[in-house]
Amino acid sequence: MLEGILAGRIEPGHRAESRTLAFLFADLRGSTAFTEKAKPEDAMALLNRFHDVAVAAVHRHDGFLDNIRGDGVMAVFGAPQPQAEPAAAAFRAAEDLLRGIDHLNAQRAKRGEPPLEVGVGLAAGEGVVGHVGSAERFNFTAVGDAANVAARLQDEAKRLGYRAVLTGAVRAHAGAARLEALGELPLRGHDPVEAWGWRGPDPGNA
């Protein structure tokens, strides 16, 4: 966050601002089982390879990494700087992320290593950006219902066997990507949402 403040992209303080935002949640599947059996240094190396791919994809499309946890990321598009089409940027970032995982898996296959599997949730809508915390310690973040939806769609992607699940608001910016209509998808702790499943980018269109 300090880099953003110094560069003038983020203003310090607690002022909040309403924006149209898109959210991307991505999770490395099966990492818990792997880390239980692997050496700590091997587990760390695997997680870092995943994050190398995810971070590069998000930054390539001007996304903001709100949260990096052990085996997952949360990214926001449309903040700190507004974007004309944050949903389109989020989808393209997801596309690049999945292509990056495919490339990484091709390398792993040559070494006889099992492929990595990633689940992605994408949603877009109105939200608020600003600083959350106390006067002594705070973080720049984005808050909105679309963030909750994207997090739950990430879980649904795993349950339903898709590499990504996205809302209709994001689907409108998916171009020629082949998506599968899932109808009104029930979500844990949330009203059902119109959702679309995606098995990932076509290898022939890399």
Image (cartoon, helix red, strand yellow):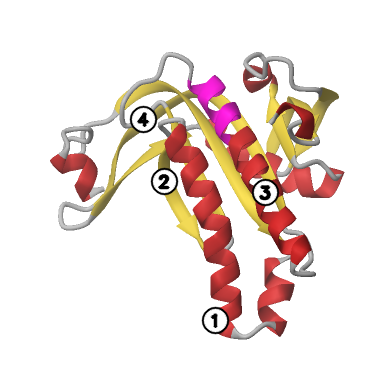
Mark 3 closeness class: few <14, some 14–19, many ≥20 residues within 10 Å: few
Residue 200 as seen in the image, left or right of residue 43: right
Q: What secondary structure is found at the residue carrying circle 2?
A: strand
Residue 171: image location, x then y, percent: 68, 19
Q: Earlier in the sequence, mark 4 or mark 1?
A: 1
The amino acid type found where label 4 is placed reads Ala
Q: Earlier in the sequence, mark 3 or mark 1?
A: 1
Q: Which residue is mark 2?
A: 66
The amino acid type found where label 1 is placed reads Glu
Q: What secondary structure is found at the residue carrying circle 4?
A: loop
Q: Is residue 100 magenta?
A: no
Mark 1 closeness class: few <14, some 14–19, many ≥20 residues within 10 Å: few
Residue nearest the observer in this picture, 85 or 148:
85
Q: Which residue is mark 1?
A: 41
Q: Earlier in the sequence, mark 1 or mark 2?
A: 1
The amino acid type found where label 2 is placed reads Asp
Q: Tell which tag, 3 or 2, sits nearer the viewer.
A: 3
Magenta stretch, overall SS: helix
Q: What's the distance in space between the residues labelled 1 and 2, CA to CA?
A: 25 Å
Q: Is residue 146 visible?
A: yes
Q: Earlier in the sequence, mark 3 or mark 4?
A: 4
Q: Tell which tag, 3 or 1, sits nearer the viewer.
A: 3
Residue at position x 21%, y 57% in the image? 137
Please give the label number shown on residue 79: 4
Q: Tell which tag, 4 or 1, sits nearer the viewer.
A: 1
Q: Earlier in the sequence, mark 4 or mark 2?
A: 2
Is 109 drawn above or below residue 98 in the view shown? below
Mark 4 closeness class: few <14, some 14–19, many ≥20 residues within 10 Å: many
Residue 119: image location, x then y, percent: 70, 47
